[in-house]
Amino acid sequence: MKLLWRLSREAVRYKYLYIWAILSTMGLTAVNLAAPRVLSAMTGIVERGMTAASLSAIGQLTAMLVALYLVRILLRFLSNYLAHKAAWYLVGDLRTKLYDKLERLDLGFFHDKQTGDLMSRVVNDTRDFELLYAHIIPEMITNTVTFAGVLAILLSINWRLALITCFPIPLILISGVIFTKKVRPFFRVSQKKMGELNGKLQDNLSGIHEIQSFGQEQYETQRVDEKNFDHIKAMLRALKISAVFHPSVEFLSSIGTILVVGFGGIMAYQGNLSVEDIVSFVLYLSLFYAPISGLAALLENMQQAMAGAERVMMILDTPSKIQDKKNALSLKTVKGDVTFEHVSFSYAAGEPVLKDISFSCRAGMMVALVGPTGVGKTTITQLISRFYEPTDGRILVDGHDIRDVTVESLRRNISPVLQDTFLFNGSIEENIGYAQPDASHEDIVEAAKAAHIHADILAMPDGYDTQVGERGLRLSGGQKQRVAIARAILRRSPIIILDEATASVDVETERQIQQAIGAIAGKRTIFAIAHRLSTIRNADLILVIEDGRITEAGTHDELVALGGVYAGMNRIQGSALTEMPQAPAAG
């Protein structure tokens, strides 16, 4: 009931559609209740003998029936369409709300989540709300009103026979409670398995190149087959319980019919029940047990909808660890001064990634982060953008603790260029302009020139309208990196983060990327993560990170003169370039 109450609050914005749908449903129920009464009245007239007056009465009752059935068509249309309209609008709203919530959750939330499972919650689980609001709730209202109305009519016809009719109802209700408790866990598992199947499909379609390259098509087909039938088996376990419950309800309902026929026959034999009343009782009997028989399907659909609703609400109820304070400051003009004061950070309790990191850089400086893989370099840059909160210490931008400013205004002043460059499936112009949606074509071209990608774009068949494909598949690694740099330049953010921007590119492309970086050096504060020391020789400050700590800090020349870890890295990379083995002579 608590969950239903929450769901009803989501649906309140469409209350007028629901009110008209409910009124139409009530009217439809009234028509359905009235029709058998008219038919039984016609039977009574025939039983008493036909006269001219009787024919006239039957004609009037026939016209009344036609009118009732025509009104029923209109009311059924309004009931169905308005309920579906409200329900699908609600589904659309919830999908948008759920997606918006996912966008605003901190990155830590996504560490143990599959993209496909989250997609399943947004698309599949929200669809169950349509089942709830367009089918289950209207049917519950219809069934309740119909049951109450028919019971009142049956009691007015013959209260003894009406009470006999009610005999199976407690048994049906008890079996419904048992069914509800048994079946919902299986629907929960079924929804979870569907999410896992979607996750696997998303993984495999994203990694199709690797699957084909390593000849793992058959292996991956088997794994998808396993996920597919895990979902099917979970669904069949739920349907197995339903398959027992449905005929049980039908059997209990049929007992009521048998009792009415038996006792009704005895009463008619004794003269305590007229033929008209017997006909009326039989006609209403189908209406009386229809809501009870429909209880099985209703409860099954309800459990499925509730299982989906629980998965949706779990996301909506998840608090983001990154939130604005009540009176957070909105950063306006940012110079780009950045300071770390004794910053420590852990992704998991007891497993520190950064330990007491402290440094300062002035606006326009280039700060390079070097060190082995996995020592916390990328984490430092993500803390600047406040994707995570420091465990200890604080980070200042222009003297403001970033926890005291709005997340939107902070990130508006930071532009990232990541090693794993992500481009959207669209044109090159759309991808560069993504950073500044109101940018003109001339602004985009200017940013592309600064990133040394303009000439490459013009050489493509469609120029700036060239489609890059999913994740930029149609561009080379170096081209994607320079498009990303152009995107960052276009935003004109005072702080730029370059996370391995020259990784895995050839020497010429590296030179072009270095030229692009050089074009913005001194104008923006740059944080550059690099394994190739040649790309950061001119950095104003180089921080050597080892085991989550800053072990050396200075310029390139200062660190080489220091003769420590950085000097060793520089010597090794220099040797690797000058002492590359020559290919053996042919023959």
Image (cartoon, rainbow, N blue to C red):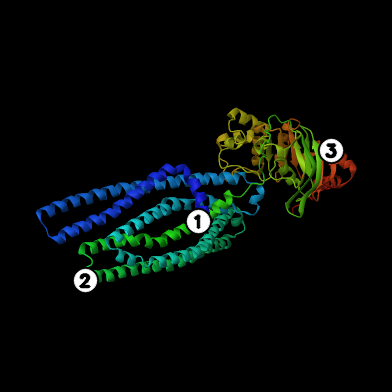
The reply to whether residue 543 is visible in this rendering is yes
For the residue pair 228 and 153, the one nearer the viewer reads as 153
Instruction: Tell which of 371 and 570 is nearer to you.
Output: 371
Look at label 1 and name its amino acid.
Met
Task: Report whether residue 584 is seen.
Answer: no
Q: Nearer the viewer, mark 3 or mark 1?
A: 1
Q: Mark 3 is on which residue type?
A: Thr
Question: What is the number of the mark on residue 504?
Answer: none
The residue singled out by tag 2 in the image is 269
- From the viewer's perspective, tell me whether residue 260 is left or right of residue 61: right
Q: Quadrant of residue 145?
A: bottom left
Q: CA distance from mark 2 to mark 3?
A: 111 Å
Q: Secondary structure at mark 3?
A: loop
The residue under label 1 is: 306
Disc number for residue 555: 3
| Residue ranking furthest to the left | 52
Dot 1: element: helix
Of label 3 and label 1, which has the lower sequence position? 1
What x and y, as percent, mark residue 311?
A: 55, 54
Q: Position of residue 98 (x, y in %)?
A: 55, 47
In three-dimensional space, the C-alpha distance between marks 3 and 1, rounded to whole angstroms, equals 61 Å
The amino acid at mark 2 is: Tyr
Disc with the residue nearer the chain's start (2 vs 1):
2
Which of labels 2 and 1 is toward the front?
2
- For this view, does 411 lie left or right of residue 49? right
